[in-house]
Amino acid sequence: MEQRPHHKFWPKRLPHSITVPATSLWHNLATSAARYPDKPALVFFGRVISYREFAAQAEKLAGALHALGVKRGDRVILDMQNCPQLVIAHFAILRANAVVVPVNPMNRAEELKHYITDPDAKVAIITGDLAPELAKASNALPSGQRLAHMIVTQFTDAFDADVSGDDAPAPAWKEWLTTRHPLPALEGGKVIAWTDALEAGHPPPEHVVGANDMALLPYTSGTTGLPKGCVHHHSSLMHNAVAGQMWGGSTSETVVLAVVPMFHITGVVSMMHTAILAAATLIIMPRWDRDVAGRFISRWKVTAWTNIPTMVIDLMASPNFKDYDLSSMTYIGGGGAAMPQAVAQRLFEQYGLKYQEGYGLTETAAPSHTNPLDNPKQQCLGIPFMSTDARVVDPDTLKEMPIGESGEIIIHGPEVFQGYWKRPDATAAAFVEFEGKRFFRSGDMGRMDEDGYFFITDRLKRMINASGFKVWPAEVELLMFRHPAIQEACVISTRDDYRGESVKAVVVLRPTHKDTTEQQIIDWCRENMAVYKIPRKVQFVDALPKSGSGKVMWRLLQEDENAAK
């Protein structure tokens, strides 16, 4: 790889690019289990699962999937909050030569239909609290498009409901985590309890997939319409798992606080796969709670924590923060939103920790850029990751921009996805040839400084960043148009001191529903979409501004909103 300006700041012990192992991701778990069979792999409210037990359960579940007819390349839905079963199921799907379709557990039935029909999924693995919503989605579909099987686990399959002390869940989680839910009815299909699937004794198939087989089909939304599946082979995830282990210095002694959602590409690759490759220990949290996090870091001597900055801000604001021991931590970092400079400075002054900001997309298997551990810059995307070439170009002419000038960030490297599932048109539009290589168009505007570090400046894509969750206005608008009172809706961002940005809907009501209130719209949205997509504000207007061709001028509404702050 040619010398680029950022190579002056490259960690001296690391190569600029790496050779990716030719094996599947399953081999990473099999190898770690063979080398460290008795080492803790997954810890969940005090329950410790060793690497031997982890691999054995994944083998049993792979056998169950094989018995249900799951074949090489089949897509299997995985819909859970963080728990050991999510990690076990993820690797079981890979062991069965199939493809993981990670689904955000906040999605509601109306959204979930697309995750069944688009990937042609016939099997899903899910927790009992979410199973009724997925069953509702499947049951509403035509018979030929429904799920055939659902494997349902309960949280207490993986921990003791009576656990107390520092390992206990947050009090607010007690009922949610300890309730054992009845299995839902699946029209035209069969629902199986997780424990029954493991105990059935079905042998797994021969493991035949390799680096160039599809491993993951995560969905990402965009400027128009429904979410698109991103085709990732074992090789693209493997690259970032191996590179992430080397970059972060993960070893078998690393202890990871696993609170970033493992349906999200960062949680899947930068946290889960990197940890399993290194035979590290994952301390699993199902959702964020600052005091549970503080207790777990102290109790389990956490050394590494990948997060979104709002989590760090929240933990440090806890009245109990002084009681927590963060001295074991050697790595802290993340992305999705900028870390405020004052918070980063406090972390460094109190704990000697340099917050490592990075940048990546679902299409790039999480990091395409990250900061060097010894030379990070604050509020900066970092430098192009191992084996990666990134440039800043004029989005119209595709000519490279001079240092310091803003343009579109384009990315080339082995971590870049193959393309969008069933969407050759979108795939063709997402890539460009530059200097004889195929580059992915990120849609993000940025600049590069004289040292080769990248900084975000704006977005080409119409997107809202709410605490690191990407909200795509077009998708929210599509859902809102199903409300009987809404004639038209335009979704924009509004500033939020805590979340960075929140969702606002500008709505035109039908003449027959003029008495509809803001709260009624918000309540309906809560029933029909994931919580982070719900508008926090609804503004009623008589008409939306439109161009001569009839398109809604969302930029005008956005500019008015920005000017009002």
Image: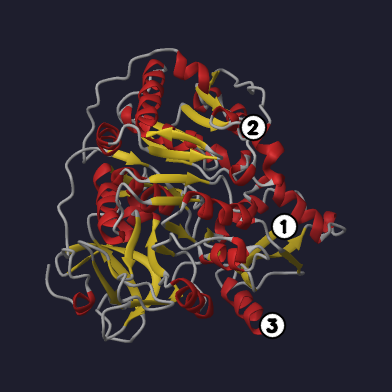
Q: Residue 322: x, y in percent?
A: 61, 66
Residue 161 shows which numbered tag? 2
Residue 209 shows which numbered tag? none
Query: Is disc 3 surrounded by few (<14), some (14 to 19) or many (20+) residues within 10 Å?
Result: few
Q: Earlier in the sequence, mark 2 or mark 3?
A: 2
Q: Nearer the viewer, mark 2 or mark 3?
A: 2
Q: Mark 3 = which residue?
A: 564
| Secondary structure type for disc 1 | strand
Quarter containing the N terminus: bottom left
Q: Earlier in the sequence, mark 2 or mark 1?
A: 2
| Secondary structure type for disc 2 | loop
**CA separation, marks 2 and 3?**
50 Å
The amino acid at mark 2 is Ala
Residue 487 shows which numbered tag? 1
Residue 117 makes an appearance in the image: no
Q: Residue 204: x, y in percent?
A: 32, 19
Q: Residue 236: x, y in percent?
A: 27, 49
